[in-house]
Structures are given as structure tokens and as C-alpha cells.
């Protein structure tokens, strides 16, 4: 009887997946045109110049239809597959929703008023604190090394220890958990914000990450609200990408970039082993951000002051078409995301990540030496 029930269960799961994904997609498709028109009427548009070299005025409230699609998907999740009342998952998912509302509100104000950096970081930190107050924090991870010797060294052991039950798990010392979690959430928000420089780039990479999160969660835990949350986000992103892929008629804006970054950071914590997926999918943007922050600090520049030194801008200025660059990022994200999910060898994952990191850093160094021109200061922060 159980064998006969299996196809029925699988079909039921597939129907739920399609419904959650489809509702988010359709909501975003239907709401993007009126939001685009509203953004123009409010003057919330991106003008050509600085980092952006597009033509004409482009609406930059793309986060609004994404948020609406995501929320409609979440409502449906709570109706069809609600988390168990009083469970840790229920608490964590509430934190994702509340934090999303806060980060969305702060991002909307930034799109509308161009907030100074201190207020931008204030909203990001408040959203991160909301997540942590709902037990969304990084306190342990799978040991990526073949032995535990490194983590048991005299200095490293001050910050980490091996789990008493599972010898493959590394536990972060309590005093460091908050710092690591805060850095992860705020860092991911800004990594996505930095990535949002070409039509369809950040939204597409974010879609790939969300779909891989959902796939990985389903493999580990089956059908659950934790599996469906990233699926709802992916559906909303795909609906928005119809209007955002080159040539874009609407940009993510701060609302979209912050909302996407916040959810990628928090949803990657909710299910086991998704941190490694996030690190591999977002490897190129993370390395690009790290390189630029160091370069700007070395030159006495504000680390978050915008310029065209990001890898995607350099490739564009080098003559590559926008779509080719974006599709190249997509292919890299898909390839390394699948490695994170389907390659069991931790050493191979580390080796591939180091190989990618080396290739990206060499490319960035070569592009830097090739251009050797002063960084143009812009008025806007990233």
C-alpha cells in the first residue's frame, strides 16, 4: 500500500510546488506594470549617469511586485502547509516575514529619499536583529576539512569547537554567534545590492539561489514551509524578471536588492547545509565585493561609495554584451549550486570554490592593471 501511495504523494508535492511558484509569479507579473507606472509618477526613477549607463528614466521600485508576490505565496503556504504551532520553524519563518517587512520599509525610504549610509545600515542591522531574535542565526556548520585537527588548535579552539554528538559538526562559540550571524545577513544584503548593476543580473542569480535552496530543502526534509518559502520568492522573482531582463523597463531598486539579500541570507540558515549552497552560488558576487572593499579602503575611499569597478561593469566596459555577461553569471551560479547539492565530497567542494576564487581574483587583478585609471567619485552610495 505504501508503494502505491508514493506516486500520489509525489504528485501532491509537485502540485503544491507549482501552485506556490505560480502564485508568486502571476502576482509579480500582474503588479509590475502598475508599480512601474506609479514609480514614474512619484519620480522614483534611475537617471542615466554614474554607475548606470542605461537610456532614459527607468523605474526602480522592482522590490514592490517581488514583495507582493512573495507575500501572496506565503499566505498560501500558511493555508496549505502551515508550520507546526509553537515549533522552531514557526518562530523562524515569522522572523523571516517580520524582517522582510522591516528591510522592505527601510529600502523603500532609501529609494524615495536616498538615505545616508548610517540609516541604511541601521535598517539592515535592525532586520538582522529581528532574524536573530527569532533564532535565525549561524551557530554550527559542517566541517569542510577531512579532520578536526584545525578546529582543535589552541587559537582556533577559542572561537570554535567540535560538536559533542556529531564529530562532523563545528560549533561556533556563543560570543561569536551574534557577530557571525550579523555579518552574514548584512553582508548578503550588500552583496546583492552591489550585484544589481546590469539588467536581470541580481534578480536572476537570486532566482537560481532560491530554487536551489528549495531543491536542497526538499531533498533533506521533504515538503515543508521551509522548502516552500524560497519557492515563493523564486516565483515572484521570475515574474519580475520578465520586465527586468535586458533591456529592462524597471530596476530592482533598493527595495528589491535589500529584500532579496535579506531572504537569501535568512533562508540559507533555516535548513541544514544551505549555507554552502549560498556560498557557492554567490561566490562571484562575494569575491567581487571583498576585492572592491579592500581596494577602496586602500585608496582612502568609502567602502560603499559607488563606481564602475565591479566585475560585471568591467566586463561590460571591455565590450561584452549585457546578456552575455548576465548569462555567464547564471551559468556559474547554476554549476556551482549543483556542485553544492549533488557532490558529496567536501574536499572537492572546497577545491572547486578555491579554483573559482583564484580565477575571479586573477581576472579582477588583470582588469585592474589593464585599466589603471582613477576611480571616479559618484554622489550616490551603493
Image (tube, helix red, strand yellow):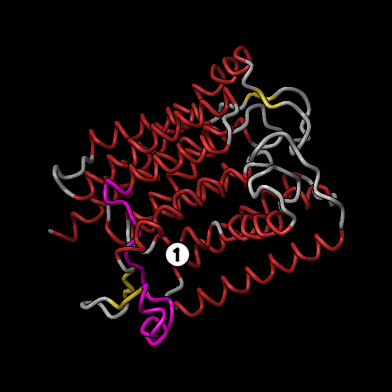
Residue 196 falls in image quadrant: top right
Of the pair 122 and 1, the residue shown nearer to us: 122
Q: Which quadrant would the C terminus be assigned to in this image?
A: top right
Of the pair 158 and 22, the residue shown nearer to us: 158
Residue 128 falls in image quadrant: top left
Which x, y percent locates residue 370? 87, 61
Q: Residue reaching furthest top?
A: 41
Residue 103 is covered by the magenta coloring:
no
- The residue drawn where x is 49% and y is 52% is 209
Residue 141 is covered by the magenta coloring:
yes
Which x, y percent locates residue 218? 33, 55
- The residue drawn where x is 62% and y is 46% is 194
Which x, y percent locates residue 156? 41, 78
User: Mark 1 highlights which residue?
Assistant: 276
Q: Residue reaching furthest front?
A: 300
Query: Image height check: is 177 above or below 40?
Result: below
Of the pair 223 and 53, the residue shown nearer to us: 53
Q: Is residue 33 left or right of residue 97?
A: right
Q: Which quadrant would the N terminus be assigned to in this image?
A: bottom left
Under tag 1, what secondary structure? helix
Query: Image height check: is 115 above or below 31?
Result: below
Query: Image height check: is 79 above or below 189?
Result: above
- The residue drawn where x is 35% and y is 74% is 160
Q: Is residue 380 left or right of residue 177?
A: right
Which x, y percent locates residue 261? 49, 45
Q: Residues within 10 Å of mark 1 (few under 14, many from 20)?
A: many
Most frequent secondary structure within the magenta stretch: loop
- The residue drawn where x is 76% and y is 23% is 56
Q: Which residues are magenta?
A: 132-159
Amino acid at each position: 500500500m505504501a508503494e502505491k501511495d508514493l506516486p500520489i504523494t509525489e504528485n501532491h508535492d509537485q502540485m503544491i510546488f507549482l501552485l506556490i511558484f505560480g502564485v508568486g509569479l502571476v502576482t509579480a507579473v500582474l503588479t509590475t506594470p502598475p508599480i512601474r507606472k506609479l514609480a514614474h509618477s512619484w519620480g522614483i526613477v534611475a537617471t542615466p549617469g554614474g554607475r548606470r549607463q542605461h537610456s532614459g528614466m527607468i523605474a526602480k521600485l522592482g522590490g514592490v511586485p517581488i514583495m507582493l508576490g512573495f507575500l501572496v505565496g506565503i499566505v498560501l503556504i500558511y493555508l496549505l502547509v502551515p508550520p507546526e504551532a509553537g515549533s522552531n520553524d514557526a518562530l523562524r519563518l515569522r522572523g523571516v516575514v517580520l524582517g522582510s517587512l522591516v528591510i522592505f520599509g527601510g529600502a523603500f525610504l532609501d529609494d524615495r529619499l536616498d538615505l545616508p549610509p548610517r540609516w541604511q545600515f541601521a535598517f539592515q542591522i535592525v532586520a538582522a536583529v529581528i532574524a536573530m531574535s527569532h533564532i535565525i542565526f549561524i551557530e554550527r556548520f559542517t566541517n569542510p576539512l577531512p579532520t578536526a585537527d584545525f578546529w582543535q588548535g589552541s587559537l582556533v579552539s577559542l572561537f570554535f569547537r567540535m560538536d559533542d554528538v556529531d564529530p562532523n559538526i563545528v560549533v561556533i562559540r556563543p560570543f561569536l554567534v551574534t557577530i557571525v550571524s550579523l555579518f552574514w545577513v548584512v553582508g548578503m544584503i550588500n552583496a546583492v545590492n552591489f550585484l544589481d548593476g546590469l539588467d536581470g543580473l541580481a534578480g536572476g542569480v537570486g532566482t537560481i539561489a532560491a530554487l536551489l535552496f528549495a531543491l536542497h530543502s526538499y531533498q533533506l526534509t521533504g515538503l515543508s514551509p521551509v522548502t516552500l518559502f524560497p519557492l515563493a520568492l523564486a516565483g515572484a522573482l521570475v515574474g519580475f524578471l520578465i520586465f527586468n531582463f535586458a533591456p529592462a523597463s524597471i530596476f530592482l531598486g533598493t527595495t528589491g536588492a535589500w529584500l532579496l539579500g535579506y531572504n537569501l541570507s535568512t533562508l540559507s540558515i533555516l535548513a541544514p547545509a544551505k549555507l554552502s549552497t549560498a556560498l557557492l552560488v554567490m561566490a562571484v558576487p562575494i569575491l567581487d565585493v571583498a576585492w572592491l572593499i579592500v581596494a577602496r579602503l586602500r585608496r582612502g575611499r568609502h567602502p560603499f561609495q559607488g563606481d564602475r569597478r565591479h566585475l560585471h561593469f568591467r566586463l561590460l566596459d571591455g565590450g561584452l554584451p549585457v546578456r552575455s555577461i548576465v548569462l555567464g553569471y547564471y551559468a556559474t551560479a547554476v554549476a556551482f549550486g549543483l556542485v553544492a547539492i549533488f557532490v558529496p565530497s567536501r574536499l572537492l567542494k572546497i577545491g572547486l570554490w578555491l579554483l573559482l576564487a583564484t580565477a575571479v581574483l586573477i581576472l579582477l587583478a588583470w582588469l585592474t592593471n589593464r585599466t589603471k585609471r582613477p576611480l571616479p567619485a559618484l554622489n550616490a552610495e551603493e
